[in-house]
Amino acid sequence: MSEVRLVAEPRTEFGKGAARRTRRAGKIPAVLYGHGSDPKHLALPALEFARVVREHGHNAVLSLDLNGGNELALTKTVTTHPIKNYIEHVDLLLVQRGEKITVEVPVTLVGDAAPGTLVTQELSTIQVEADALNLPEHLEVSVAGAEAGRQIHAAEVVLPAGAVLVTDADALLAAVNLAPTAEQLDAGETADAVADDSADAS
């Protein structure tokens, strides 16, 4: 993945009031740490950062233009307001060129399994170790034509060159089962209704 440039500003005010003022100015309070250095308190452009996360995910490499210098960072944690859904705070991890790091990578199932089956995805992400500047945004696993009884494990995910699987190779990623019949679904709904009636009666 190529680096995404953002202009960051140092923050000299702290606390809830200062954070609110930063957000009102269209910026996000952030902290950059790692490699034994003192944490740096920053303000990131809110719209630009949100677009990077939306388009590239958390594993995007940020090239931070800070006080005329340059720092490379990864998004470690994004804190979002639980109701208003805006980004409240960001933790950034300092990285270096050539460094190997471990990250969570989203896994997407593609293709359609055999007719009459139901695919259950057990893991939505796996851990991968890769070069900090060459992290995969996401990984795909095909279930096209998979028959009932097929199980897909983490070891079957095809990784980009240089990446190493950290998640247990035997971890179950997805399972293909027979889809329930209409009669089974009806029977299940009937059983649920009987159980609800019994609970109400007691």
Image: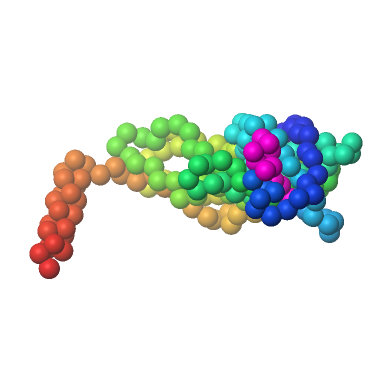
Location of the C terminus by quadrant is: bottom left
**Magenta residues, as a range?**
21-31
Which quadrant would the N terminus be assigned to in this image? top right
Q: Residue furthest left?
A: 201
| In this rendering, position of residue 32 left or right of residue 176 | right
Farthest residue toward the right? Answer: 68
Query: What residue do we see at 29% from left, 37% from top?
Result: 116
Does 70 sit above or below residue 78?
Answer: above
Nearer to me, 3 or 46: 46
Asked if residue 96 is among those painted magenta in the image, a careful observer would answer no
**Vertical position of residue 132 compared to residue 36: above or below:** above
Residue 116 at least partly seen: yes
The answer to whether residue 185 is left or right of residue 128 is left
Percent across and percent down for residue 95 are 79, 47
Q: How is the image coloured?
A: rainbow
**Total label count?**
0
Q: Position of residue 14 (x, y in %)?
A: 73, 53
Q: Quadrant of residue 8?
A: top right
Q: Is residue 24 magenta?
A: yes
Task: Give how far across and how far down residue 175 sits, in percent.
Answer: 42, 47
Q: Nearer the viewer, residue 70 or 118?
A: 70
Give the image quarter of residue 60.
top right
| Looking at the image, residue 133 lies above or below residue 202 | above
Q: Position of residue 97 (x, y in %)?
A: 84, 43
Residue plotted at (19% across, 51% down): 188
Q: Residue at x 46, y 50 (%)?
A: 122
Direction from residue 176 to residue 167 in the image, left or right:
right
Between 71 and 17, the residue placed more toward the observer is: 17
In this view of the protein, can residue 131 be seen by the observer? no
Q: Residue at x 48, y 45 (%)?
A: 83
Closer-to-camera residue (67/192)? 67
